[in-house]
Image (spheres, rainbow, N blue to C red):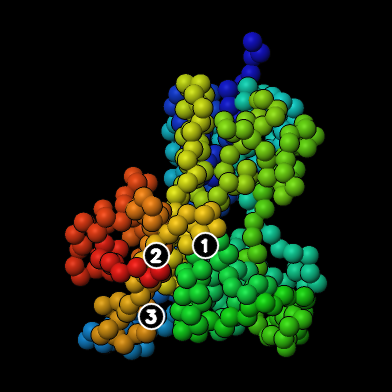
């Protein structure tokens, strides 16, 4: 047997890479991990964590307004961008330290730098050549910005959290999670906010009712929505502003443009092609059920394989992979009924099939819906509304989809996801006594089918 320096070398210290490293080390393996930019990965540094903090920040403006109807006198509150930016940076630095300590305490060796795979058992970092029995690629994904004139003037989600000055006018380009979330953030913090998307409705893949409901609620909050619009060029003006050109309308003058047009696998420069690792056309790595590539010493998991780009998915894959190494059993991951949330404003929470997915698959469904004005808004006078929806298999009575737009939707759907994973029927929901007064109780009190 060859004498390697490590049993496992992980490239990428994001959610999946850190979890795999720690678990493998705990099982007795000699483990090293290399990270060249974001200790803790995208989620901790320029993704889920700072985004959620910014969503919290952007909601306080409405909270101050609503509080007045409840007797609180708080006139004169103003927003200070440097305070939010710098406090966020301090929190991320704290989390970076925690991740580094977790790895160190597990006995994992950390290399700071971009690793490249030289051969099946050798990794190169700068002048270092390190041998290892197994290599795990967990480098995640990277923002995609199309090649248009003026692309050098735009921001991605990598830079947006640390910009020097808060823009008074901003354009967000895209129609996925990140686009709708940041449109809400900027609007809530006081910017004149525009969202441009090349199709007729954003959040493709979500339930149609959810998408249209969010569109209407975002419009109420002052976000200017530009559908069926393709940005063609961005021109910087003498005063530093940006003039955005599209074929469908007049040029739009803004102070910043954020591109949120998807993410691509972060595989460039790793040496995978040189080794003949099979990759898909979109740059993601092809793996088998045990996250192994066609080069048997090389594995990959997380965003880089093209599975749902969600932190909990990468964590689950990492645990399944290490268990596979320990036991030899197939790494079992159930990608059905993965709950997810979009922290737009109001929030989206969803699990299971959309109505469209169910009908397209030939499943006869009964739909239950409830739309209402939340109790909190009745006193404040705010017009924001909530939508809840259940998709039920008419034959078995099983709830196969649950969707919500409203405050704390992610928190509520997390609990609903357990019920759906357990195979709960609509009768189970009906027999469950609600907690009153809450918005969540609507999920167990909907009795009249909408269709």
Out of 335 and 362, give the one closest to the viewer. 362
Label 3, residues with CA under 10 Å away: few <14, some 14-19, many ≥20: some
Per the model, the C-alpha gap separating discs 3 and 1 is 25 Å
Asked where in the image residue 298 lies, by quadrant, the reply is top right
- Mark 2 to mark 1: distance in Å? 11 Å
Q: Which of the image's four quarters has the N terminus?
A: top right
Circle 1 — which element? helix
Coordinates of residue 164 in the picture (x, y in percent): 59, 72
User: From what the image shows, is residue 136 above or below residue 268?
Assistant: above
Q: Residues within 10 Å of mark 1 (few under 14, many from 20)?
A: some
In the rendered image of this protein, does residue 154 appear above or below residue 32? below
Decide: is 79 above or below 305. below
Label 2 to label 3, Cα distance in Å?
23 Å
- Between marks 2 and 3 in the image, the one whose residue lies nearer the viewer: 2
Q: Which residue is mark 2?
A: 367
Disc with the residue nearer the chain's start (2 vs 1): 1
- Quadrant of the rendering where the C terminus is positioned: bottom left
Q: Which mark is residue 384?
A: 3
Residue annotated with mark 1 = 356
Along the line of sight, which residue is nearer the eye, 102 or 169?
169
Q: Is residue 112 left or right of residue 18?
A: right
Q: Are marks 2 and 3 in contact (CB under 8 Å)?
A: no
Residue 421 in the image, given as x and y percentages of width and height:
37, 46
Residue 94 visible in the displayed image: no
How packed mark 2 is, by other alpha carbons closer than 10 Å (few <14, some 14-19, many 20 or more), is: some
Element under disc 2:
strand
The residue at 39%/65% (across/down) is 367
Q: Nearer the viewer, mark 3 or mark 1?
A: 1
């Amino acid at each position: 047997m060859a004498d390697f320096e490590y049993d496992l070398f992980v490239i990428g210290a994001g959610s999946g890479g850190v979890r795999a490293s720690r678990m493998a080390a705990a099982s007795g393996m000699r483990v090293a991990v290399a990270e060249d930019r974001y200790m803790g990965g995208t989620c901790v540094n320029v993704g889920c964590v700072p985004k959620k903090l910014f969503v919290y920040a952007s909601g306080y403006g409405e909270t101050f307004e609503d509080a007045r109807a409840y007797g609180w006198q708080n006139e004169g509150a103003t927003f200070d961008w440097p305070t939010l930016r710098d406090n966020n940076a301090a929190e991320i630095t704290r989390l970076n330290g925690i991740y580094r300590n977790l790895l160190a305490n597990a006995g994992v060796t950390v290399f700071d730098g971009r690793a490249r795979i030289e051969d099946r058992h050798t990794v190169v970092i700068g002048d270092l050549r390190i041998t290892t029995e197994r290599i795990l690629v967990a480098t995640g994904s990277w923002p995609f910005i199309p090649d248009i004139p003026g692309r050098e003037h735009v921001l991605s989600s990598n830079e947006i959290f640390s910009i020097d000055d808060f823009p008074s006018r901003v354009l967000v380009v895209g129609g996925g999670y990140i686009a709708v979330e940041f449109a809400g953030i900027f609007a809530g913090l006081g910017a004149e906010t525009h969202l441009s998307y090349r199709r007729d409705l954003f959040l493709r893949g979500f339930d149609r009712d959810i998408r249209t409901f969010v569109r209407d609620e975002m419009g109420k909050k002052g976000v200017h929505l530009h559908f069926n619009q393709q940005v063609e060029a961005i021109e910087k003006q003498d005063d530093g502003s940006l003039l955005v050109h599209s074929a469908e309308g007049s040029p739009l003058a803004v102070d910043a443009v954020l591109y949120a047009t998807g993410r691509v696998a972060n595989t460039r420069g790793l040496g995978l092609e040189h080794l003949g690792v099979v990759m898909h056309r979109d740059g993601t790595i092809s793996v088998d059920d045990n996250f192994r590539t066609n080069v048997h010493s090389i594995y990959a998991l997380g965003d880089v394989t093209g599975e749902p780009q969600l932190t909990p998915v990468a964590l689950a894959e990492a645990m399944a992979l290490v268990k596979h190494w320990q036991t030899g059993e197939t790494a079992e991951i159930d990608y059905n009924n993965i709950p997810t949330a979009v922290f737009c404003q109001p929030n989206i929470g969803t699990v299971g099939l959309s109505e469209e997915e169910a009908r397209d698959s030939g499943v006869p469904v009964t739909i239950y819906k409830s739309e209402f004005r939340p109790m909190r808004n009745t006193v404040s006078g705010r017009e924001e509304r909530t939508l809840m929806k259940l998709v039920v298999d008419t034959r078995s009575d099983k709830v196969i989809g649950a969707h919500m737009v409203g405050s704390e939707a992610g928190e509520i759907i997390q609990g609903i996801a357990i019920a759906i994973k357990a195979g709960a029927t609509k009768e189970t929901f009906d027999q469950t006594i609600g907690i009153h007064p809450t918005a969540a109780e609507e999920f167990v009190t909907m009795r009249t089918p909408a269709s």
